[in-house]
């Protein structure tokens, strides 16, 4: 990973990858929506409401994947001082928070007709809500200090401490008696979901993943450029102390 520690090298790589991931996102999500909303059948028990699954489940996957990305980036920043790791974690947080919020909203919409309530303090629902608060806490800590370095370290520690919640979300249906059904896609052996429903679910899952990669690259590139601008302004301030002392604004 240290090969890509150089911002210029990372920017070149991101510029080459981003168009492909963006195109893949459009194709995969477009195909997923077609198969999910038109080609796949309604469920014999849930009826048309099962189609919420094609957004809800991939959102949950990406909510956990984004936080895992943050945790890995935070570990690299704290242990190996990778210069881009903090920027990756900071850039991934809003995307993961959006996916987690979408998961909670669609879960509520799905839960009302299935369970008869918008919300239940189910183990998976509760742990997913905790994940959303962890995202908010991470973003608040990252911007709570005047010194960006202190904010990056504090938020990285929180990301690593909060990572324990990710396996709790994953295995909550196995550890406790919850309203959610056990894993049907990632179970050992063949998935227990019908292929006509599995195809759009996987298409949406991969499409959401390429969307995450695309937006992450855009945000990291923006963070790198913002860091360069801050560095240039600091150099200008230090090189013209008389102008600052007299109250002039340095451009």
Image (tube, rainbow, N blue to C red):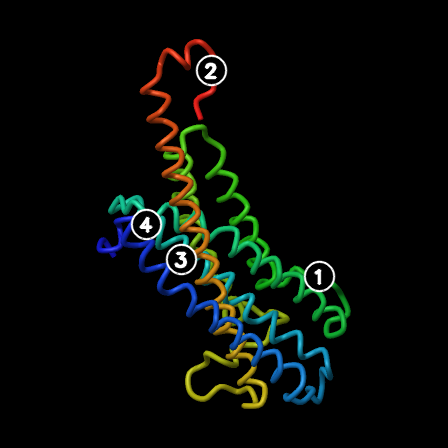
The mark that comes first in sequence, 3 or 1, is: 3
For the residues bearing labels 3 and 4, Cβ distance under 8 angstroms: no
Q: Residues within 10 Å of mark 1 (few under 14, many from 20)?
A: some
Quarter of the picture holding the N terminus = bottom left
At mark 1, the secondary structure is loop
- Residue depth check, mark 3 versus mark 2: number of the one nearer the observer: 2
Q: Residues within 10 Å of mark 2 (few under 14, many from 20)?
A: few
Residue 129 rendering spot, x and y as whole percentages: 59, 55
Relative vertical location of residue 200 with respect to residue 112 in this rendering, above or below: below
At mark 4, the secondary structure is helix
Q: Residues within 10 Å of mark 3 (few under 14, many from 20)?
A: some
Q: Which residue is mark 4?
A: 75
Residue 219 rendering spot, x and y as whole percentages: 46, 51
Res. 119 mark: 1
Q: Which residue is mark 2?
A: 248
Query: Which of 103 and 227 lies nearest the eye of the viewer?
Result: 227
Res. 69 mark: 3
The residues tagged by marks 1 and 4 sit, at their Cα atoms, a distance apart of: 34 Å
The mark that comes first in sequence, 3 or 4, is: 3
């Amino acid at each position: 990973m240290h090969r890509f520690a150089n911002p210029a090298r990372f920017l070149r790589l991101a510029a080459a990858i981003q168009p492909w991931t963006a195109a893949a996102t459009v194709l995969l999500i477009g195909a997923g929506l077609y198969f999910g909303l038109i080609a796949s059948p309604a469920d014999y028990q849930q009826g048309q409401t099962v189609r919420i699954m094609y957004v809800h489940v991939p959102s949950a996957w990406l909510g956990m994947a984004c936080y895992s990305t943050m945790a890995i980036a935070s570990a690299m920043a704290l242990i190996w001082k990778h210069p881009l790791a903090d920027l990756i974690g900071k850039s991934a947080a809003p995307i993961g928070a959006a996916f987690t919020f979408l998961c909670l909203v669609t879960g509520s919409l799905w839960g009302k007709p299935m369970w008869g309530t918008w919300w239940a303090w189910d183990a998976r629902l509760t742990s997913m809500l905790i994940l959303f608060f962890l995202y908010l806490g991470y973003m608040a800590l990252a911007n709570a200090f005047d010194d960006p370095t202190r904010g990056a370290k504090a938020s990285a520690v929180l990301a690593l401490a909060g990572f324990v919640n990710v396996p709790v979300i994953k295995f909550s249906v196995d550890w406790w008696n919850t309203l959610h059904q056990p894993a049907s896609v990632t179970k050992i052996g063949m998935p227990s979901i019908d292929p006509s429903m599995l195809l759009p679910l996987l298409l949406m899952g991969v499409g959401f993943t390429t969307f995450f990669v695309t937006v992450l690259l855009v945000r990291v590139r923006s963070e790198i450029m913002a860091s360069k601008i801050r560095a240039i302004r600091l150099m200008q301030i230090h090189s013209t102390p008389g102008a600052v002392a007299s109250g002039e604004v340095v451009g």
